[in-house]
Amino acid sequence: MTRTLYDLCGRDERLRFSPYCWRVRMSLAHKGLETQFKPWRFLQKDELAFADYDKVPVLCDGDKVVTDSFEIMRYLDSAYPEAPLLGEGVSYQRALFFKHFVERSVTPALFRIVALDLLAAIHPDDRPYFRETREARFGCTLEEFHQPEQGRQALQKTLAPVRELLRETPFLDGEVPSGVDYLLFGSMMWAYCVSEQALVPPADEVAHWFERMLAQYDGLAARAFTVRDLPAA
């Protein structure tokens, strides 16, 4: 069976920075599923016409096409039930809550930290589209939105309950990482890939957790290509 994930790339095809694609990358590794990763850029929407979707991730698993990162995680649990990601019942509801927490609170704070770094990491042909769509969303220019110190302060407050949990267990899902860890890690990895800005203090419990996550699956994320590997724009 051929399994392919359409995966957002930047100005270098090796730079894969989507928070939602990283959720799925880690989930596929968690399940031990070999996958081909196909680079995709913001303006290549025609390439996803077969999925009736205009953004990534898109997973093609044989004849099955699944869109949206959380739905892909649900699909992986259904199709490959060993080593669950999200679980069912109360566990699923907890994961769903955490998904909304990350998307509504964590990711916006991170965006404040890395907005202009992200713009520089994107392929030059995609930058006008990215600027136009994001500035329409935020109601201001990216330069005005880019407030790293404000973003770090918001992130520290937002991650307070995460920090407390990580004082009790090495991962958010317990002794080993799983779906909830991948939801947060995707967003943290997004910022890490496109920026050299400090996200949290090095002694922070979240920083220690992030290092543990980078090391998972034979250093899958630690080996990822980032802006640190790129020549200056």
Image (cartoon, rainbow, N blue to C red):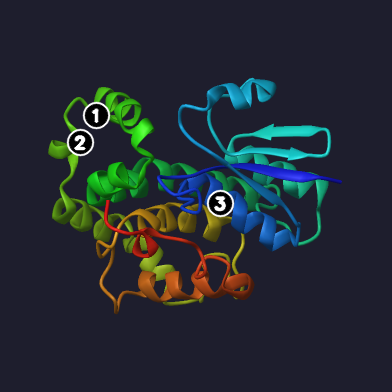
In the rendered view, would you say 68 is above or below 83?
A: above
Q: Which disc, if any, is residue 23?
A: 3
Q: Is residue 94 visible?
A: no
Amino acid type of the residue that numbered disc 2 sits on in the rendered structure: Leu
Going by the numbered disc 3, the residue's amino acid type is Arg
SS for callout 3: helix
Number of residues whose C-alpha sits closer than 10 Å to that of mark 2, classed few (under 14), some (14–19) or many (20 or more): some
Regarding mark 2 in the picture, which secondary structure is present there? helix
Residue 8 tag number: none
Q: Residue at x 23, y 45 (%)?
A: 116
- Asked if the residues shown at circle 2 and circle 1 are in contact, with their CB atoms under 8 angstroms apart, the answer is yes
| Cα distance in 3D space between marks 1 and 3 | 24 Å
Q: Residue 101 at what x, y percent from top left?
A: 42, 46
The percent coordinates of residue 138 (x first, y second) are: 24, 29
**Percent position (x, y) of residue 45?**
54, 24
Dots 2, 3 in contact, CB < 8 A: no
Q: Does residue 107 appear anywhere in the picture? A: yes
State left or right for residue 42 relative to residue 39: left
Asked whether, in this view, residue 21 is left or right of residue 200, the answer is right
Query: Label 2 vs label 3: CA separation?
Result: 25 Å
Give the labeled residue for mark 2: 142
> Mark 1 — residue?
138
Number of numbered markers:
3
Near mark 3 (Cα within 10 A), the count class, few <14, some 14-19 or many ≥20, is many
Q: Is residue 145 above or below residue 226?
A: above
Residue in front for this viewpoint, 14 or 61: 14
Please tell me whether residue 128 is drawn above or below residue 59 in the rendered image: above
Please state if 87 lies on the left or on the right of 228 as rendered.
right
Residue type at mark 1: give it: Phe
